[in-house]
Image: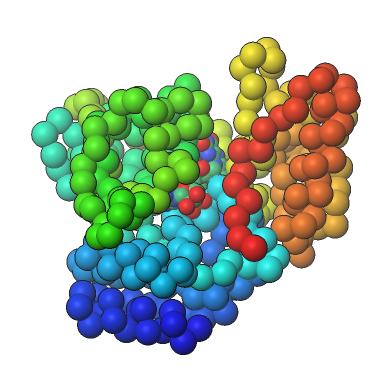
């Protein structure tokens, strides 16, 4: 841990920024699934120094061979029971929005529901589909989050990033949205890039209409049981070539309610795995493996996990 303490101290000295730092921090407190062992170091930079501090941290950690995991709202991940080695850089305090030409720009740690609210307050339509979805703008851009027939890339115009995969010094740059987005895919996956902010093209509309759609979406999630238990949304991606949603295949196989330790296929939704209390990451993985093999045996199709497994 001493090398991590040294990295943080050096970065703070050169790039003043208030940072909350915790060692051996249980990740179960930072994920919507409420599972996950300790991170060697969890840190959350606050306030205006976020970009410079984060760039220095990513660069110094890389040079020292210490890995960094970038955390948004923890709404799409299962952290292993052994936790995460190295540093977890929590972006969720880097929040806020700004008006731009024909839309809004959001810092990556802004929650999705807050982003939808900000757009509604400004009388701008386009982000209603995000109302009630857990997570942050950074995580949603990374995942190309989608629902109600819309996805982030439909409204995204550009993204500001720190690219720390380049040799030597990390580069802060703006990239136009376009190529590289697909169903649950974004060009940021598999790269060493921290998303700092994202710009969205939005259209003026009647505030009451915007709010009504947002309320309908929140209500729909509530009635479908999204908030009843700790979970990470859909466990598996849909395979559109197969002709029906993965949740329906799981339903038809009668797998709702199937349990592994504290993890269970939600009795109310075939594609949501819930933590009924005391689930471990191993329970969730075992349950997903069991569902995969049953779906494969019955249909020949192997469902691809949507949830990301991270950590040791
Ligand atoms: C109840 C519930 C319902 C859900 N419904 C939906 C739904 O309808 N549609 C849908 O698409 N998803 C849904 N999800 C999943 C989740 O809400 C989205 O995937 C969300 O976009 C994840 O954002 P996050 O900030 O929590 O990302 P995290 O889980 O924190 O991270 C996900 C990935 O993004 C990376 N990442 C996060 N922030 C950054 C950043 N700033 N820069 C670079 N990389 C970053 C992480 O390293 C990680 O690899 C649901 C989840 C829950 C719990």
Task: State whether residue 240 appears in this view.
Answer: yes
Q: Position of residue 163 (x, y in %)?
A: 30, 50
Compared across the picture, whether 142 is left or right of 268 comes to left
Q: Position of residue 154 (x, y in %)?
A: 35, 25
97 or 175, which is in the foreground? 175
Q: Position of residue 310 (x, y in %)?
A: 60, 55
Q: Please, which residue is most extreme toward the bottom here? A: 2
Residue at 88 percent across and 25 percent down: it is 297
Residue 7, quarter of the rendered image: bottom left
Compared across the picture, whether 236 is left or right of 29 comes to right
Residue at 48 percent across and 32 percent down: it is 185
277 or 49, which is in the foreground? 49
* The C terminus, quarter of image: bottom right
Task: State whether residue 123 appears in this view.
Answer: no
Q: Position of residue 59 (x, y in %)?
A: 32, 65
Residue at 40 percent across and 51 percent down: it is 192
């Amino acid at each position: 841990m001493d090398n991590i303490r040294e990295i943080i101290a050096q970065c703070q000295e050169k790039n003043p920024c208030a940072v909350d730092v915790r060692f051996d921090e249980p990740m179960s407190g930072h994920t919507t699934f409420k599972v996950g062992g300790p991170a060697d170091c969890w840190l959350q930079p606050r306030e205006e120094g976020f970009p410079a501090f984060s760039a220095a941290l990513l660069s110094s950690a890389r040079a020292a061979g210490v890995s960094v995991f970038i955390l948004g709202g923890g709404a799409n991940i299962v952290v292993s029971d052994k936790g995460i080695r190295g540093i977890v850089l929590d972006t969720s305090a880097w929040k806020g929005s700004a008006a731009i030409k024909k839309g809004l720009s959001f810092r990556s740690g802004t929650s999705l529901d807050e982003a939808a609210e900000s757009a509604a307050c400004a009388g701008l339509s386009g982000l209603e589909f995000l109302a009630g979805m857990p997570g942050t703008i950074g995580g949603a851009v990374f995942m190309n989050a989608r629902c109600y027939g819309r996805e982030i890339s439909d409204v995204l115009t550009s993204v500001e990033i720190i690219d720390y995969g380049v040799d030597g010094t990390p580069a802060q740059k703006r990239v136009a949205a376009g190529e590289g987005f697909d169903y649950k895919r974004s060009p940021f996956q598999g790269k060493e890039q921290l998303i700092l902010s994202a710009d969205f093209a939005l259209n003026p509309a009647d505030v009451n209409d915007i709010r009504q759609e947002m309320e309908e979406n929140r209500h729909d999630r509530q009635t479908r049981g999204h908030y009843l238990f700790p979970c990470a949304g859909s466990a598996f991606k849909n395979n559109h070539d197969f002709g029906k949603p993965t949740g329906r295949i799981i339903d038809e196989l009668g797998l709702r309610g199937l349990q592994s330790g504290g993890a269970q296929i939600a009795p109310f939704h075939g594609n949501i795995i819930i933590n009924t209390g005391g689930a471990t990451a191993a329970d969730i993985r075992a349950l997903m493996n069991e569902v995969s093999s049953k779906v494969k045996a019955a249909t020949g199709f192997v469902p691809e996990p949507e949830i990301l497994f991270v950590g040791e």
